[in-house]
Image (cartoon, rainbow, N blue to C red):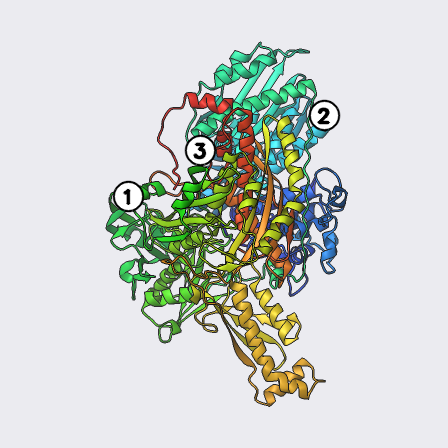
């Protein structure tokens, strides 16, 4: 079981909890271990990943199939995926595809793109997979689709045999006492009481009225884990039968307040089936919402009572229950009472009208009456597994056999601190005909003022939801339904399985935090700045040091070597010494006996500041203050001014592109172990650049690198985020180990990781472009601004990569680019998959898109007319390349995506749909591979052959899911002519391979693979005389003979990559080893009323030569593309006007989830890690096309400001319908709650 977010937001820690129920026999639930209190498990059985199978005994079929389907890359999320699926199969051995999607909805993966996980698990389905139109893949005339039977690509797999699964522990069956007794558990800070029965619970609540009553722990748990909230006494109600009871009545159902949301959904589905559609409209609305509410694990834990009493307007159920006029049953020492759930029940945010001693016992949910219509609406950052921005429950009753409104209830959540009923609107519309309600309702609703954040967007959603309800009811009254169709396909190849896939699927794969505790081990927790720019007046750690278990506090004065070091002549501080320059900068660290003690004590360190002005955070502010780092870069081709003079038209505009959080499932951390001799230090660290970590630790401790050894077994995802920042964290942990003489473990909490380590740089591109009437671009002058944060980190290299990719695949004869890194008071931005490539590419694509719009031409036509086409072409930095493969990819993508025909279909769709619009976009790709800093283009390996014939390889690369170890083994197997099973890679270690380059820039396999090849070839040359002399010898006999002949069976391999460099003064140089080419086409559909969107289909064509392992590489393409979907559509980092990061966990920051729309067709001969991220921009530009279609229909311009990511809010506001105009007319100027940095 893995620990990742601590808030139930990622699913990495999923386990199965089983309880015995006399009626249902044994029931199994998947739950988040990070939120499941140990004390609540009395009488339950818990199964973790280690309990269902292993490579040492026998694999469970779930473990085997996810591995063989290539569904495990970095592997950190795999145990959670396995346990979710295992639990489903325990409850339902023959699940449907919908069951699988629902089960995995609470599990996030940052590597795979989810497709291979589904591929592996859908083999458990009893029926052939069909597309959404009900037809088999081949019936859809898609010869590339292999949905019908993924098992043909696997070796023989173990059958699922439910009789072999673990039984419920008999001792838990026989140990049930005849009479339940009260249980009390005492902890260091918390006392837990499980009452014997309802009577005991009522008595306890009367005695301890301020103690929280806990059932699912999904609201209280995250506050305790992430915010340090402490409740001295907790009363547990999960074992009280009355709170779980379900009673069916003639006019509805009474559900116990302790019923989980999963149980509630099953109850409502049963009711819908038995009652029919007319009587179950309330149930249908609740089920619709429950399907989007949180993940399966949370729904298994959270209760309906907890959802209501949390009194959080973002929780969706209250608005529907209130609209349905549900009744709450309340009990206390004073007796029982009933309350109709309404807005009066919620007195303030997080508060209700219940007295502290009262208990919510049950909820009456009524059946629907004739001529009553009920609907639920929600809009969130991600369609599923995300809090709603606004939710609504609406109910209308018509006079019998008429369309006259007899009663109307409309409730909104998320537009104020409590649930809101729009009473005036409801009153005004009663007694009116249905045709009159829309206009009058909108007029009444627009008079209300709603709360920030998203004030304007929330206001338009209020109007849009009401209009959607009006249209739904009107259509249902007229009995007109419009079916939706959607096609899909997904062709991939599947050769060798990831070398560690089985270990990852069984939980045996070891990550740094899985390493058992070292004797005397301590924990370190960071103390960070709460000010953006201030002088440190004093640091007082006395209160923290007096706390139990605290050993010491370390800061700059405790650093034995250098606290300040130079990174390419730019200073970097380990601990802030005199001044802080961002919120989240590390000032010191607490060292304590346990993780919890260190975390609590760190919060008690008091720091006094004196603010320094100015403090600024945005690119615009940096431009205003001329706050730029050196060097300022420039590239130029041709004569730009001359090109502008010849152009028919000149366009000046800009495009903003937001940043992105890495969100690797395994947070950053390490273990530092001091040795007894000569100041040696061993570090077990999650780093993509172990050599740099070794170097920084050496500088910090003031000792030589030869005494510091960094070990890296594998990473739970990296994406560039574990190159630089982990070195500083390692130096801090090493300083603590040096000072205490004991091993120190550092594991960042998810919120701290996001705050401290930052992510992808936001970019602003301002451009001037000269173009002809046919769309030919004669000249472009682009200035790129990136937000680098408070220190340089890798921002100058990121900017260089953006400039080097500013031409993409286009031969613009006169092209000039300036690159300026803005220094601001935010945590320094760092490397992220693609480096600056996606930003540089996206802005030039934005230029092409706008030129096409201004010319009134299809965007693909303008792209085609400006593309490089010749066999010999030169980039804008004068590097020679052939455009043949790029053009081939472009043409093949046009053909296989059926682009021309789909454009016509989209036109027809848009003509017949006013509130839904579709758009399509296709882009080419030219992406440079390797480091533009030539000295990084090297690789090294050590190959050892042992007398038994086994081979051990060490190399300088880092395994982080991309399969570098698997590919290295394949290469060695081919050259040495031994089976892959005889070759092993233990770890990456600076003691074996020194001075290794980082695993980055999509160059790791090239460098490591060539080094392994070189080492193996050296060994084979030594063995060649023996092979000729003894052709009959087996491999082992040959090795033994070589040993006896004193032939060295160890060799170092080295790859000296090409020299790459750029002369920035002359604007020329071979910046890259080679170029990867490709093309991508995406079609999307938007809902204008809410801004929601879905990806209908994506086609990717890539041509990068022969793949070493197509299965792993296709996984990299898909994973990179899905990460790009997040970058360009839903992943939005939000900062307060004071520079504080607000999105610090999965509840606020949304990455694509399993049910997010994924690519359906990929044609790839070889895929690599970084380039596919850029392909996510096809969704951005397709969304822009769809918005333009909506605007044209409303008589608005095709050209409009639109920035990335294309969130639901931005899409809706850009459509500019009657509802956005209504809100805009009465907009009140308020202070923004977030800023575009």
> Considering the numbered disc 1 on the image, is that residue within a helix, a strand or a loop?
helix
Q: Nearer the viewer's eye, disc 1 or disc 2?
A: 1
Residue linked to disc 3: 209
Instruction: Determine the CA span between mark 3 and mark 2.
Output: 43 Å
The residue furthest bottom is 1045
The residue furthest top is 431
Residue linked to disc 1: 625
Q: In this view, does 629 lie above or below 418?
A: below
Q: Which of 1201 and 152 is in front in this view?
A: 1201
Give residue 979's position: percent from left, percent from top: 67, 72
Say which residue appears at 33% left-offset and 71% top-offset: 703
Residue 202 as seen in the image, left or right of residue 543: right
Which comes before the other along the chain, label 3 or label 1?
A: 3
> Considering the numbered disc 2 on the image, is that residue within a helix, a strand or a loop?
loop
Instruction: Determine the CA span between mark 1 and mark 2.
Output: 66 Å
Residue linked to disc 2: 276
Residue 278 as seen in the image, left or right of residue 642: right
Residue 205 as seen in the image, left or right of residue 141: left
Q: Nearer the viewer, residue 703 or 975?
A: 975
**Quarter that holds the C terminus:** top left
> Considering the numbered disc 3 on the image, is that residue within a helix, a strand or a loop?
loop
Instruction: Determine the CA span between mark 3 and mark 1.
Output: 56 Å
Give residue 862's position: percent from left, percent from top: 54, 41
Q: Is residue 941 visible?
A: yes
- Number of marks drawn: 3
Callout 3–callout 1 Cβ contact below 8 Å: no
The residue furthest front is 646
Q: Can residue 187 be seen in this view?
A: no
Which comes before the other along the chain, label 1 or label 2?
A: 2
């Amino acid at each position: 079981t893995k620990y990742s977010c601590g808030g139930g937001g990622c699913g990495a820690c999923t386990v199965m909890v089983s309880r015995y129920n006399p009626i249902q026999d044994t029931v199994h639930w998947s739950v988040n271990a990070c939120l499941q209190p140990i004390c609540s498990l009395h009488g339950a059985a818990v199964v973790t990943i280690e309990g269902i199978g292993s490579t040492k005994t026998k694999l469970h079929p779930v473990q085997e199939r996810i591995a063989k389907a290539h569904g495990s890359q970095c592997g950190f999320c795999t145990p959670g995926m396995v346990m979710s699926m295992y639990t489903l199969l325990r409850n339902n051995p023959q699940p449907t595809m919908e069951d699988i999607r629902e089960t995995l909805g609470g599990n996030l993966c940052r590597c795979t793109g989810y497709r291979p996980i589904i591929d592996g698990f859908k083999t458990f389905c009893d029926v052939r997979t069909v597309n959404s139109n009900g037809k088999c893949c081949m019936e859809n005339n898609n010869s590339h689709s292999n949905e019908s039977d993924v098992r043909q690509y696997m070796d023989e797999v173990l059958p699922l045999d439910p009789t072999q699964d673990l039984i419920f522990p008999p001792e838990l069956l026989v140990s049930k006492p005849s009479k339940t007794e009260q249980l009390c558990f005492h902890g260091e800070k918390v006392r837990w009481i499980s009452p014997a029965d309802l009577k005991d619970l009522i008595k306890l609540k009367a005695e301890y009225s301020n103690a929280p009553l806990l059932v699912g722990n999904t609201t209280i748990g995250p506050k305790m884990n992430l915010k340090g909230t402490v409740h001295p006494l907790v009363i547990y109600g999960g074992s009280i039968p009355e709170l779980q009871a379900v009673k069916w009545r003639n006019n509805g159902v009474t559900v116990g307040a302790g019923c989980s949301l999963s149980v509630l959904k099953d109850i409502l589905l049963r009711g819908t089936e038995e009652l029919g559609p007319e009587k179950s409209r309330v149930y249908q609305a609740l089920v619709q919402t429950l399907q989007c509410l949180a993940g399966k694990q949370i729904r298994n834990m959270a209760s309906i009572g907890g959802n209501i009493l949390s009194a959080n307007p973002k929780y969706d159920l209250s608005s529907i229950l209130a609209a349905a006029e549900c009744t709450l049953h309340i009990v206390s020492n004073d007796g029982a009472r009933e309350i109709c759930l309404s807005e009066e029940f919620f007195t303030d945010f997080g508060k209700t009208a219940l007295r502290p001693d009262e208990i919510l016992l049950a909820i009456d949910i009524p059946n629907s009456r004739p001529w009553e219509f009920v609907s639920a609406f929600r809009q969130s950052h991600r369609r599923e597994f995300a809090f709603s921005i606004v939710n609504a429950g609406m109910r209308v009753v018509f006079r019998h056999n008429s369309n006259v409104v007899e009663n109307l209830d409309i409730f909104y959540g998320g537009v104020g601190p409590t649930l809101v009923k729009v009473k005036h609107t409801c009153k005004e519309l009663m007694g009116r005909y249905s045709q009159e309600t829309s206009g009058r309702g909108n007029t009444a609703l627009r008079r209300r003022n709603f709360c920030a954040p998203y004030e304007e967007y929330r206001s338009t959603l209020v109007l849009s939801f009401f209009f959607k309800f009006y249209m739904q009811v009107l259509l249902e009254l007229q009995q007109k339904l419009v079916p939706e169709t959607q096609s899909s396909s997904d062709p991939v190849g599947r050769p060798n399985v990831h070398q560690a896939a089985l270990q990852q699927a069984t939980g045996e794969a070891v990550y740094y935090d899985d390493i058992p505790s070292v004797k005397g081990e301590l924990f370190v927790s960071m103390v960070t700045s709460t000010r953006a720019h201030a002088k440190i007046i004093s640091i007082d750690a006395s209160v923290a040091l007096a706390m139990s278990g605290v050993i010491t506090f370390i800061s700059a004065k405790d650093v034995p070597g250098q606290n300040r070091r130079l990174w390419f002549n730019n200073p970097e501080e380990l601990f802030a010494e005199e001044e802080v320059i961002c919120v989240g900068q590390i000032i010191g660290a607490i060292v304590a006996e346990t993780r919890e003690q260190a975390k609590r004590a760190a919060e008690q360190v008091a720091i006094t500041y004196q603010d320094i002005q100015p403090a600024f955070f945005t690119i615009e502010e940096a431009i205003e203050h001329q706050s730029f780092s050196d060097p300022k870069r420039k590239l130029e081709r041709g004569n730009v001014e001359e090109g502008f003079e010849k152009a028919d038209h000149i366009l000046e505009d800009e495009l903003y592109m937001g940043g992105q959080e890495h969100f690797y499932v395994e947070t950053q951390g390490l273990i530092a172990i001091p040795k007894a001799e000569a100041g040696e230090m061993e570090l077990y660290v999650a780093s993509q650049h172990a050599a740099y970590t070794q170097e920084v630790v050496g500088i910090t401790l003031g000792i030589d690198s030869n005494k510091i050894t960094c070990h890296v077994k594998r990473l739970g995802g990296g994406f560039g985020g574990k190159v630089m920042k982990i070195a500083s964290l390692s130096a801090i942990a090493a300083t603590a180990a040096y000072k205490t003489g004991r091993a120190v473990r550092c594991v960042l909490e998810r919120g701290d990781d996001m705050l401290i380590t930052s992510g992808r740089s936001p970019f602003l591109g301002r451009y001037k472009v000269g173009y002809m009437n046919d769309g030919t671009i004669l000249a472009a002058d682009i200035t790129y601004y990136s937000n680098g944060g408070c220190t340089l980190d890798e921002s100058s290299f990121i900017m260089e990569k953006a400039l080097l990719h500013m031409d993409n695949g286009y031969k613009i004869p006169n092209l000039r680019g300036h690159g300026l890194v803005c220094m601001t008071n935010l945590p320094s931005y760092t490397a992220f998959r693609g480096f600056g490539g996606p930003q540089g590419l996206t802005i030039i694509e934005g230029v092409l898109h706008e030129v096409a719009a201004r010319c009134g031409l299809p965007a693909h036509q303008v792209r085609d007319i400006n593309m490089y086409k010749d066999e010999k072409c030169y980039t804008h930095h004068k590097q020679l390349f052939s455009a043949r493969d790029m053009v081939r990819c472009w043409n093949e993508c046009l053909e296989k995506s059926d682009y021309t025909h789909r454009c016509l279909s989209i036109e027809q769709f848009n003509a017949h749909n006013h509130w839904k619009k579709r758009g399509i976009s296709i882009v080419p790709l030219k992406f440079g591979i390797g480091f533009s800093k030539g000295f990084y283009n090297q690789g090294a390996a050590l190959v050892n052959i042992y007398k038994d014939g086994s081979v051990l390889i060490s190399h300088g690369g880092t395994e982080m899911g991309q399969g570098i170890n698997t590919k290295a083994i394949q290469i060695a197997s081919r050259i040495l002519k031994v089976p892959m099973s005889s070759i092993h890679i233990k770890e990456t270690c600076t003691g074996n391979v020194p001075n290794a380059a980082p695993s980055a820039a999509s160059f790791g396999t090239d460098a490591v693979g060539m080094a392994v090849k070189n080492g193996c070839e050296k060994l084979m040359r030594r063995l060649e005389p023996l092979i000729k002399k003894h052709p009959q010898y087996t491999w082992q006999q040959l090795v033994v003979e070589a040993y006896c002949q004193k032939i060295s069976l160890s060799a170092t391999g080295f790859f000296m990559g090409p020299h790459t460099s750029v002369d920035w003064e002359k604007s020329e140089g071979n910046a890259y080893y080679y170029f990867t080419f490709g093309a991508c086409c995406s079609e999307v559909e938007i809902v204008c009323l809410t801004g929601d969107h879905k990806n209908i289909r994506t086609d990717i064509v890539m041509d990068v030569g022969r793949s070493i392992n197509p299965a792993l590489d296709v996984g990299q393409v898909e994973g990179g593309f899905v990460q790009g979907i997040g970058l360009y559509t839903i992943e939005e980092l939000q900062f307060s006007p004071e520079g504080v990061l607000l999105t610090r966990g999965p509840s606020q920051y949304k990455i694509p989830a399993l049910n997010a729309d994924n690519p359906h067709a990929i044609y790839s001969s070889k895929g690599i890690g970084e380039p596919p991220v850029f392909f996510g921009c096809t969704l951005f530009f397709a969304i822009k096309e769809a918005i333009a279609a909506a605007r044209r229909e409303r008589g608005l311009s095709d050209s409009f400001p639109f920035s990335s990511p294309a969130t639901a809010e931005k899409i809706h506001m850009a459509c500019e319908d009657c509802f956005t105009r209504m809100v805009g007319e009465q907009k009140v100027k308020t202070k923004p709650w977030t800023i575009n940095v």
